[in-house]
Image (cartoon, rainbow, N blue to C red):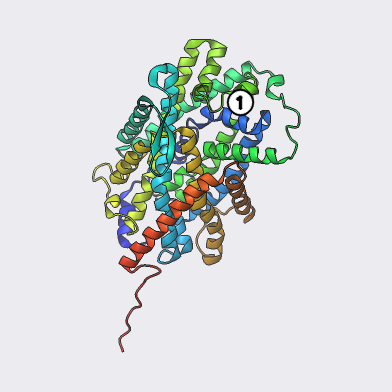
Amino acid sequence: MPAAADDAEQQLIRGVSLWGATTLNMIDMIGVGPFITIPLIIAAMGGPQAMLGWILGALLVVCDGLVWAELGAALPGSGGSYRYLSEIYGARKFGRLMSFLFIWQLTFSAPLSIASGSIGLAQYATYIFPGLGQETKVTFPILGNVEINAIPVALAAIAAVGLAVFLLYRRITLIERLSKFLWVGVMLTILWVIFAGVTHFDPKLAFDFPPGAFTLRPEFFTGLGAALLVSVYDYWGYYNVCFFGGEVKDPGRTIPRAVLLSILFVAVIYIVMNISILGVVPWREFAGSANTPAQRYVISSFMERLYGPRAGLVAAVLIMWTAFASVFSLLLGYSRVPFAAARDGNYFRLFARVHPRHRIPYVSLLVMGGIATLFCFFRLADVIAALVVIRILVQFLAQIAGVIVLRVRRPDLPRPFRMWLYPLPALLALGGFIYVLISRRNFLKEIRYAAVLIVVGLIIYFIRARMRAEWPFERAEQVPG
């Protein structure tokens, strides 16, 4: 790493503890996703067997979490995958291309992820203010007919992003306190939903499997693929601590523990919550609300059914709180990645600036928040699908293979945490993500978009590398004769 990068890293404060890191991961993971996507998973698999999506999704992210845990402990600076891909594949050679492609896709996928939480928040606001409007169709020159959110919904989502930027524009030690405060609201929401479901639980409803629910036919596997795509999106965020690893106390121990603890806690919460809800609302009713306005606020409708209209309103407010907590955590983590790239000369220098008083990468924070506001106009389902496919293709597959490559290339690298049962979890994660990519109906649509993104990124990289005489266009050094 260049000396300038070391200096920039040293300006950051290692102020995030294990509890702070775990809570930041959890509020990232438990965004609005599980409160909106329940109907989508049930509709995909056609019954309560949709729980397989949550269970297998948890196993998949545990395997991938072990990849992040090993890399995060061994390479504990800010930047996450940017830093890992560069180190794995050679910082001055192929790794420079891979890390550039990661930053390039992050320009799209990180704001998509941030926007998904703010869009979900705004959609739950329609339960309280039904007049916010419905989606409308707009024609774009390249994308064709695309449904976008109603302007009031988009503006509410943009306001959520703006508030998150405002709250993050301060020292990391204050941010950790804010994250714990937000985490309390998230957990109260989850516990109330679980309590409501458990106290009104009917096992006949929860386990009302349709005929042939577990018959291994093609429809079962395509449905499982669609369910896994949604559950993977809902679980994502367990790696958030890796992106601000330069601000974590004792990273060799804290990062692996935060990754694995957050997965464990959230998996238990999701599985218990969904079984308890299915024990109150018939699964056919949930499936029927998929891709309809009712999908936007299914939990509020669930609470209204049990406790009356006021409970529905309270639930909507709490879930909006939860969604905002996710936006807050996502923006914190992703704003550190362009900073990490800029500090070692692989991105615009402006992003390497650290605020003189707050000591945060403020330019990166402002830019990522600004781009996220643009995606607030698009439908949540389209944002989720694009986000998952782009990130798997450009980031996750290369990183999973990379943890094996790094073991071979740098066996002496200190590894405070080593993957359990190596290399089995990495291979299972690789196979699982490939299955998610290709096992859904119309899966080629998002893959084409991701392929175009990769090709454009390659063109930009090679033009830039040619101009700067970087790999693979380095000039041979002249040796004096």
Q: Residues within 10 Å of mark 1 (few under 14, many from 20)?
A: many
Taking the image as shown, residue 348 lies to the left or right of residue 426, namely: left
Q: Compared to 401, does 477 lie above or below? A: below
Q: In which quarter of the image is the C terminus?
A: bottom left
Residue 256 seen anywhere in this rendered image of the structure: no
Residue 152 in the image: state x and y as whole percent. 35, 25
Which picture quadrant has residue 347? bottom left
* Residue ID at (35%, 27%): 151
Q: In which quarter of the image is the N terminus?
A: bottom left
Q: Compared to 120, does 440 lie above or below? A: below
Which picture quadrant has residue 184? top left
What residue sits right under mark 1 in the picture?
A: 287
Q: Is residue 453 or residue 338 the one in the foreground?
A: 453
Residue 5 in the image: state x and y as whole percent. 33, 57
Q: Residue furthest bottom?
A: 481
Q: Is mark 1 on a helix, strand or loop?
A: helix
Q: Compared to 132, does 423 lie above or below? A: below
Q: Residue furthest left?
A: 356
Q: Is residue 365 or residue 10 the one in the foreground?
A: 365
Q: Compared to 70, does 357 lie above or below? A: above
Residue 210 in the image: state x and y as whole percent. 73, 27
Residue 30 in the image: state x and y as whole percent. 50, 32
* Residue ID at (34%, 75%): 475
Residue 201 seen anywhere in this rendered image of the structure: yes
Q: Which three-letter amino acid code belongs to the residue tagged 1?
A: Ala
Total label count? 1
Taking the image as shown, residue 410 lies to the left or right of residue 338, namely: right
Q: Is residue 67 or residue 156 the one in the foreground?
A: 156
